[in-house]
Image (cartoon, grey):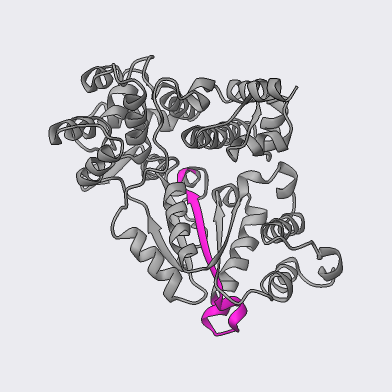
Amino acid sequence: MSKKRKTDSVRATPQGIRLVRDSIRDSVLRERQKRREKNYAQTYTKEDLAHDARVSIDTLDRFQGGSNVRRDSAEAIAEVLKLELADLIDPSRGQRPSNFYVERSPFESECYETISSQPGALIRIKAPHRTGKTWFVEQLLHQVKEERYQSVTLSFCDADRTVFTDLQTFLKWFCTSVGDSLELPSQLEEKWQNDLGNNSNCTNYFETYLLAGINTPLVLVLDDVDLVFEKREVADDFCRLLRGWYDGARRVRGDTWRNLRLVIVHSTDIYGALDINYSPLANVGVEFPLRNFYLKEVQELVQQYKLHWQTDQAEQIMSLIGGNPYLIHEALDYLTLHPEMTLENFLQNAVTEVSPYRNYLGELLSTLRQNSNLAVAFKDIVNSATPIRVEPAYMFQLHSMGLVEIEAGGAAPSCELYRQYFRDRL
């Protein structure tokens, strides 16, 4: 019996874990857009994915964590996410590289310096979806752990739709989730006072319980905070809470708050759906907007993948996809797993239906088609040989999605791949 179970079990590779994580995030974004069009308040959640795949939350968590799960469960997860199971677990066509990372100087050193030297620091890491924010944070946490700092990472993708129904429910989930990560039993029933405001209760719970026994800095990473931003009834008070903690540490409120270092991570894609004048957590802490890779960084990554390229080959791929970290990694992953594929063939197929980018580009196309005015604005941009000006709100949204770069003369596609793909389809 044990032998059969071993045969029927599979484990996701590190690269497969990243693909699952990105695809879950994409599902959240797709469902968010659909529900927004229909004026629904809910968002797609991990619980929804588990339900759709007919697996337990525990199974989904174990698969994402790199532990063994039954093959049929892995197949169901892959099917719902529209992924090939072989891309997640099968190393037979070549071992996928994992944990490859290229520093984008000086961001890493500046982030680390801020966290290590500023008690009560708050840093905001923002960029469009799939630009390497998660890798960036993982590298940052690796550095702070070497200093023996504690760390907790909390993703708001893990919250189901009921969490966002009201502020008290949301903050209790927040307190409980951080407490679980610190392996502390919940004391919410004893400590939550109904005659106090929700933010005050949350602050007291952190100060008197969650942070009370911590003598070294605690780095609290809040990931996917953009999911909170779109819930204005929760977002305003939550942002006010975080701002209060940051200000309290700066006023030397005590070692408790000075030991807390907040890392706020969010995608800018949501900005297009927000009031253009609404800037969550504006002017709080230190902002680090991630940039794309430079040529020398792409060359370093190529070396890590053990692809023997000349400088002109790195230049060729960047001429199509620029320095977008996700597009670069996907290209190098694909070429590593398909050694029979030449770079020339890859570039020729990049905007076709056999491209490894087809699902990603299709999702962007679907998002654009759901907003006809935005689609028209982007169509004008991709059909222009020079940067052009469009309605500021549309330019802002397209830039937030990572589709355009803003230049002196207006907006231009952020890479040639987008120009070719969307010019033929919009």
User: In the visual, does 189 lie left or right of 256?
Assistant: right
Q: Position of residue 46 (x, y in %)?
A: 66, 37
User: In the visual, does 16 lie left or right of 385?
Assistant: right
Is the N terminus in the top left, top right, bottom left or bottom right quadrant? top right
Q: Residue furthest top?
A: 353
Magenta-drawn segment: 247-269
Q: Can residue 263 be found in the magenta stretch?
A: yes
* Residue 225 higher or lower than 352, as above or below: below
Residue at image x 20%, y 34%?
314
Q: Is residue 51 visible?
A: yes
Residue at image x 41%, y 21%?
358
User: In the visual, does 70 lie left or right of 327?
Assistant: right
Residue 319 found in image quarter: top left
Residue at image x 74%, y 63%?
184
Q: Position of residue 340 (x, y in %)?
A: 28, 16
Q: Position of residue 60 (x, y in %)?
A: 66, 34
Q: Nearer the viewer, residue 275 or 87?
A: 87
Q: Nearer the viewer, residue 1 or 85?
A: 1
Q: Nearer the viewer, residue 423 or 72?
A: 72
Q: Is residue 412 visible?
A: no
Is the C terminus in the top left, top right, bottom left or bottom right quadrant? top left
User: In the visual, does 175 lie left or right of 113?
Assistant: right
Q: Position of residue 20 (x, y in %)?
A: 54, 33
Residue 376 found in image quarter: top left
* Residue 335 higher or lower than 220, as above or below: above
Q: Can residue 65 be found in the magenta stretch?
A: no
